[in-house]
Image (cartoon, helix red, strand yellow):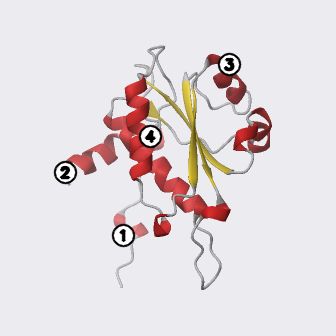
Amino acid sequence: MTDFLQLAHDRYSCRAFTDRPVEAEKVDALLDAAVAAPTAVDRQPWHVWVVETPEAVERLSACTRFGFGARVILVVGAAADEAWVRKYDGRNFADVDASIVGTHIMLAAHDLGLGTTWVGHFDAPAVKEAFPEMAPYDLVALFPLGYPASEGGPAPKHLERKSVDELVTRL
């Protein structure tokens, strides 16, 4: 457990990347981590698009100011009609499942020496217009991906965490 806890503590939202290309094998490893992510009733109501050609990255970057110059961006979407729905209140878990996938991607990226961050600030309708294949999905997050630049590093608030006592109640 110590190795995982260290990974969880060391990972940070990377907002500056080098020009070094991300190897296809590492992107494939991130996709393997995504497929391994647990989802409600194992429905896997999500899809990932690997945006990697310069033209596609430019189109996607036009829809957010938070691409951070990444040469590869993963887009995670959720399909509500494929997800498990809790019968007691009708709660659809597609976005939860996609979020679990995103968390796996972020942790696996750090483990592989890559940086990424969860980007939720993007114009989803514009992304769907630029990439019609994404239109049927609820676009949950973008993950700019690359090798962390030396001038980057964790944001000042990264180490500011509430205490366990503030966040946890034992009943």
Is 3 above or below relative to 45? above
Res. 55 mark? 3
- Quadrant location of residue 121? top right
Left-right relation of 3 to 140: left
Query: Amino acid under label 1?
Result: Asp
Q: Are marks 2 and 4 in contact (CB under 8 Å)?
A: no
Residue occupying the point 48% across, 51% down: 101
Q: Amino acid at mark 3?
A: Glu
Looking at the picture, tell me which residue is in the foreground, 156 or 43.
43
Instruction: Estimate the x, y position of residue 139 in percent, counting from the top left.
Output: 66, 48
Residue 122: image x %, image y %? 70, 40
Q: Tell me whether circle 1 and circle 4 mark residues in contact (CB < 8 Å).
A: no
Marks 3 and 2 in Cβ contact (< 8 Å): no
Front tag of 1 and 4: 4
Question: Which residue carries the number 2 mark?
Answer: 2
How far apart are labels 2 and 4 at the CA level? 24 Å
Of the two numbered discs 3 and 4 on the same chain, state the one appearing first in sequence. 4
